[in-house]
Image (cartoon, helix red, strand yellow):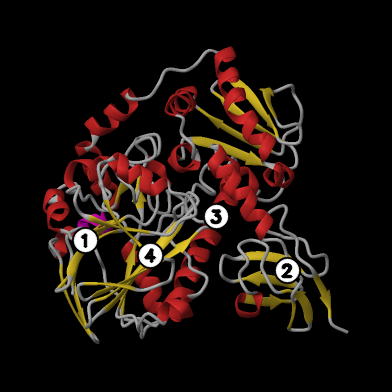
Amino acid sequence: MRVTGLGHAGLFIETAAGSVLCDPWVNPAFFGSWFPFPDNTDLDWAHYGRAADYLYVSHLHRDHFDAENLRRNVRKDITVLLPAFATDELERELSALGFTKFLRAPSGTPVERDGLRIMITALTGPGDGPIGDSALSLDDGRTVLLNQNDAHPLDIAAIREFGEVDAYFVQFSGAIWYPMVYQLPLSAKKEFAARKRQGQFDRALRYIDAVEAKHVFPNAGPPCFLDDELFEHNGTGQDGESIFVDQLEFLRQLGRARPRVTAHLLLPGTVAEPEDTACKLTHRYTETEIEHIFGEKPAYLREFAGRQRAALAAERASRSPALPRERLLTELKQWWEPLLTRADRICAGVGGPARLDVGEVPIVIDFPAREVRLWDGERCRYTLSTSADLVATNIERREVDWSNSLLLSMRFTASRIGPYNEFLYVFFKCLSMERIEYVENYYDSCQDDGQDIVLDGWQVQRRCPHLRADLGRFGQIEGEVLTCTLHGWRYDLTTGRCLTADGHDIRASAVS
């Protein structure tokens, strides 16, 4: 097996039984905010698109689903490995690009094609990517590969039943806007960013420990930001207020925490040939070039930005002009109010009005009243502020997932009173009736099943209210705080209150 890194989560996997092109992203994403790091624009994308037998796109986030690259460079008679998502949006998007051959398999069920065993594990919760994410397992008879990208599967034991993993590609860096966009004192932002970076590392470490692969490759990140407006977010920021750890930083931290883990640097164009305990690694960069990329990162990124000026200018020119106030309000009312009417659990979960400042126009999404209106001066626990052209563009494109466009762009600011509210951000990624129906039904099906467990002297419900992880496996108690180690959600056992987000309290009591 030969694996060529294509940047970010992109892989080209060659085996005697066929080759797989995974998540080929090269064009700027999220309103021109995200670029792969390091630069991968000079790879021979047409070659990979012609040579591959299979195409695997893990999910619809645009740092994985690059429509322009897929349209331009990937042959349309390729067989697409399609995750078993609850909606057919990914298939529709790929069909619209001209792809016609799809290999569908139930989630977690191996299939065999011409000597290549393939398994896709699909995740379908509201917090999983844009309503869906997935991981890919491959076995060519000699080597077992697990490409986890952004997916956070609950059951690694089930994935390991596919085969003991030789090559493991795991997400390690940040892929969110928190805390960078929040209006916070610098000291608080630095503290929250440090916690977030540590949380990202701890999560990757838990998966590395559970998978027990012979070879680990940090993958699926980080992005870099080449627009002057966002340049300060690169890496860990100027004063540690950002979360985007790079590959070498992660490898150094992993080496300290797990010195016996064999991990490798994978860059665009790097070829890895894992064979049992050995792995031949061939970089296309010289040691001097690698030192420049990572050791002189600001200078390298300025050079990269210079090469991308035309792409940034084209993205800015593609945006729609701001809408007049009355038309803006009318468009959002006609679009969102029918969704709010159906969104019972989302509206109850938000529990109050949220303010959206569109340029100079303050708008309120009144979740209890199920209406969109102009702000009337009332107190709002949540405020998002962004430029009018971005909102106008999303309206013109009827963008159903503002998380997958506006929010991940980090071209907004946010403030809140109290903890994170999952339901507010779920609403912004579910701006179609299809998605609202799915998420509302999902929440209905995830009601507490009444099962309890005893853990370190406390009786608690078995399932974490976040994504129903088994707290018998993932729960850890320190003092009177329970942490679900899968995603780091915390609960006060004396009251049952969720300390991470509103609307996710837990049933708990001390065992006498």
Looking at this view, name the residue that lies furthest to the right.
Answer: 512
Q: Looking at the image, can residue 190 be seen?
A: yes
Label 3 sits on residue: 127
Classify mark 1: residues with Cα within 10 Å, few (<14), some (14-19) or many (20+).
few
Does the residue at mark 3 contact the one at mark 4 (Cβ under 8 Å)? no
Report x, y in % for residue 347: 71, 41
Distance between the alpha carbons at the discs numbered 3 and 1: 37 Å
Distance between the alpha carbons at the discs numbered 3 and 4: 22 Å
Label 2 sits on residue: 449
Residue 416 placement: quadrant: top right
Q: What residue is rendered at 35% in x and 59% in y?
A: 220
Tell me the quarter of the image containing the N terminus: bottom left
Say whether disc 1 or disc 4 marks the residue closer to the N-terminus.
Answer: 4
Tell me the quarter of the image containing the C terminus: bottom right
Say whether disc 3 or disc 1 marks the residue closer to the N-terminus.
Answer: 3
| Highlighted magenta segment, given as a residue range | 290-296
Classify mark 3: residues with Cα within 10 Å, few (<14), some (14-19) or many (20+).
some
Single out the mark in the foreground, 1 or 4.
4
Label 4 sits on residue: 105
Specify whether 208 is left or right of 333. left
Single out the mark in the foreground, 2 or 1.
2
Q: What amino acid is labelled 1 in the image?
A: Glu
